[in-house]
Image (tube, rainbow, N blue to C red):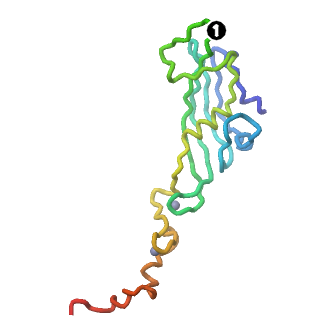
C-alpha cells in the first residue's frame, strides 16, 4: 500500500495518471517513511486530487488537497481545527547526463530529478502542506483574543478589569461628580 505513492516518471503512460483519494494520516505521520518532515498535529487523512502528465520532456503534477491540523489560536490560545486547502503544482525534468546540454526555457519553475524519476508523492504532499503553513493562525476571524489586562478569553468570558476594581486607587473617584 505504501508503494502506491511511489511513482516512476519514466514509466508514466502517455495518458498520465490520476488520483482522487484520501492519503492516510498514519502514513503522512510516519517518520520512517519519506524524507520530508511529518506534519505536526495532522488530524485524519488528507484528501488529494492529483494528476501526473507527461509534457514533452517534462512531467507535470497538478492537483489540490484539503487537510485538517490541530493548532492553537495566536489570539486566544484555544486549540482549534485549522482547515487548510492548497494546490500542487510541480514540474520535473530529468537531469542532463554528462556532456548533454541542460538549457530549457523555463528552468526556474522546474525541478530536476535523476533518471528514471523515482518520486515519493507522500514527500510532495508533505512539502506542499509545509509551504502553505502559517505560523500565526486564528480560531476565527472574529476571535476577540485575551484581555491584555485580566487575561480572560474574551470569546467566552467578560473582561474582569472593570468589574473588579477594588484594588484600583481611582475606583473611589467613580462615585464623585467632578463637575461640582
Ligand atoms: Zn482565538
Ligand atoms: Zn480585562
Which residue is at 74% across, 41% downward? 31
Query: In the displayed image of the protein, which residue is found farthest to the left?
Result: 180
Quickly name the residue at label 1: 98
Q: Of 46 and 166, which appears nearest the observer?
A: 166
Q: How many marks?
A: 1
Q: Of 36 and 89, which appears nearest the observer?
A: 36
Which residue is at 68% across, 25% downward? 119
* Quadrant position of the C terminus in the picture: bottom left
Crowding near the residue tagged with mark 1, few <14, some 14–19, many ≥20 C-alpha atoms within 10 Å: few
* Quadrant position of the N terminus in the picture: top right
Vertical comparison of 141 with 101: above or below? below
Q: Of 115 and 2, which appears nearest the observer?
A: 115
Vertical comparison of 36 with 155: above or below? above
Q: Position of residue 3 (x, y in %)?
A: 77, 29
Residue 142 falls in image quadrant: bottom left
Q: Position of residue 53 (x, y in %)?
A: 60, 20
Q: Position of residue 6 (x, y in %)?
A: 72, 27
Which residue is at 54% across, 41% downward? 132
Give the structural element (helix, strand or loop) at label 1: loop
Q: Position of residue 163 (x, y in %)?
A: 44, 83
Query: In the displayed image of the protein, which residue is found farthest to the top?
Result: 99
Amino acid at each position: 500500500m505504501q508503494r502506491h505513492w511511489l511513482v516512476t516518471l519514466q514509466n508514466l503512460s502517455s495518458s498520465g495518471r490520476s488520483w482522487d483519494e484520501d492519503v492516510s494520516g498514519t502514513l503522512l505521520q510516519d517518520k520512517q517513511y519519506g524524507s520530508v518532515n511529518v506534519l505536526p498535529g495532522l488530524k485524519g487523512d488528507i484528501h488529494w486530487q492529483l494528476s501526473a502528465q507527461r509534457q514533452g520532456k517534462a512531467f507535470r503534477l497538478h492537483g489540490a488537497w484539503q487537510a485538517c491540523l490541530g493548532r492553537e489560536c495566536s489570539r486566544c490560545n484555544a486549540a482549534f481545527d485549522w482547515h487548510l486547502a492548497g494546490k500542487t503544482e510541480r514540474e520535473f525534468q530529468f537531469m542532463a547526463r554528462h556532456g548533454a546540454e541542460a538549457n530549457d526555457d523555463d528552468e526556474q519553475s522546474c525541478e530536476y530529478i535523476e533518471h528514471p524519476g523515482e518520486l515519493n508523492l507522500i514527500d510532495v504532499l508533505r512539502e506542499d502542506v509545509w509551504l502553505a503553513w502559517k505560523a500565526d493562525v486564528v480560531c476565527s476571524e472574529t476571535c476577540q483574543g485575551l484581555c491584555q489586562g485580566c487575561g480572560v478569553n474574551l470569546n467566552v468570558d467578560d473582561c474582569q478589569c472593570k468589574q473588579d476594581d477594588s484594588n484600583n486607587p481611582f475606583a473611589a473617584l467613580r462615585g464623585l461628580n467632578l463637575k461640582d
